[in-house]
Image (spheres, rainbow, N blue to C red):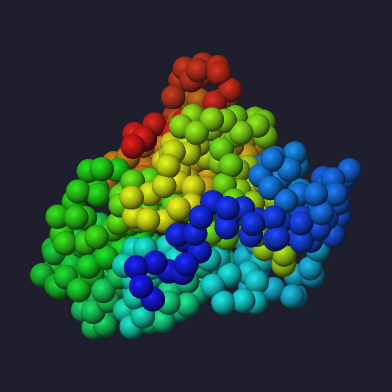
Amino acid sequence: MGEYFDPRETRSADARSAELAARLPAVVAAAGRAPAGAARLAGIDPALVTDRAALGRIPVLRKSDLPAAQKADPPFGGHVALPPGSFARLFTSPGPIFEGEARVQDPWHMARAFFAAGFRAGDIALNTFSYHLTPGGWMMDLGLQALGCAVIPAGPGNSEAQIELIGAFRPVGYVGTPDFLKILLDGAAASGRDASSIRRALVSGAAFPPSLQAEVRSRGIDAFQMYGTADLGCVAYETAARDGLVVAEEVIVEIVRPGTGDTVPDGEIGEVVVTVLDEEHPLLRLALGDLSAVLPGASPCGRTNTRIVGWRGRADQTAKVKGMFVRPEQVAEIARRHPGVGRLRLVVTRQGEQDAMTLRVEGASAEGLADALAASLQAVTRLRGEVEVVAPGSLPNDGKVIADERPVG
């Protein structure tokens, strides 16, 4: 390999459009073989969907609607034609949303993101994303293996054991949330152990604010961001140019006006909508609820695909906390478990360079109530958080149940 993962990354716009015209009709036809896909594509001839304009006439599918659809028609809500047994692995992501992993090399198209971050064949990488139930760990693992890297399947948590592994295997790369990278580095420093083998990192799943970027850089680690989801894999990735995120060659990204399927002009903030060019598990115009914008022009790194500015907040109230999605439906479930309380508001902030949650609940102060609510918060969201019981009527009557107060940028 040279400076780029493959020649597709530097091809002309005409060449990329030609591939789109050749592949899109088959992907759309495959989506139409699933019951829900057939209903959604009624009146649309797959053979005529050969460019972005034609793709834009397909109604968007909102990720926030998938949990209800899958509950009504398990496991995939009628959006996948293949039987569950045809996949290599089956997962559940927070929501819950059920996912299948195709039986192909690098099914989540992660390898090019790792390559852009400087990972190479023969590198040892510490993968701290979870391998349990959710696809994050496997997603990264398979991308690293496609590059020829050796993977330490560490998963999250148990930092003491991970620091020992770093000392023994001397990994050159870290994969995980930026928060956990700091925990490992701080833990190694506090215990007098050497973690200096880590020279590069691919981080995702949580905010990576400039202050934390600067701290990681000061410790000699070149860290790159990847934007992806459990449904789609890699959507866009950072390059050495440090100028936006380059969209992966395996997907099509549109930026639309929130609540619609209409694309907005380049530079305007809108909702991210993604299509995956995969006939086995086609996803057409999946609206993620994330906000971003298209950067005009090509990246200074030489890659010619569309660039986006990265994450700019949520188009809905769903928030990603420590790599896990927290949804309004989950806050409602906590309220259901405690019928005596009033309004609830989950406030997401940053504390000590880590995501933090505080659940504010209207209610009469009662012994054990805060502890019971904290237990429900962890059980429903799989995340720990603080609980504040506040006076009845003190929370705003504005319908907001999740307030993401983390700084953007």
Q: Position of residue 348 (x, y in %)?
A: 41, 37
Q: Position of residue 387 (x, y in %)?
A: 42, 37
Q: In this picture, is 54 found above or below 397?
A: below
Residue farthest to the left, as pictured: 192
Q: In this picture, is 321 found above or below 119?
A: above
Image quarter in which the N terminus is found: bottom left
Image quarter in which the C terminus is found: top left
Q: How many callouts does the rendering have? A: 0
Q: Quadrant of residue 263?
A: top right
Determine if residue 350 is in view. Answer: yes
Nearer-the-camera pick, 28 or 364: 28
Q: In this picture, is 252 found above or below 362?
A: below
Q: Is residue 71 left or right of residue 155?
A: right
Residue farthest to the right, as pictured: 43
Name which residue lies at 70% across and 60% down.
22
Name which residue lies at 37% across and 43% down.
356
Nearer-the-camera pick, 309 or 194: 309
Name which residue lies at 16% across and 62% down.
220
Q: Is residue 156 left or right of residue 210?
A: right
Q: Position of residue 36 (x, y in %)?
A: 83, 51
Name which residue lies at 63% across and 69% down.
101
Determine if residue 206 is in view. Answer: no
Q: Position of residue 253 (x, y in %)?
A: 57, 47
Q: In this picture, is 344 found above or below 47?
A: above
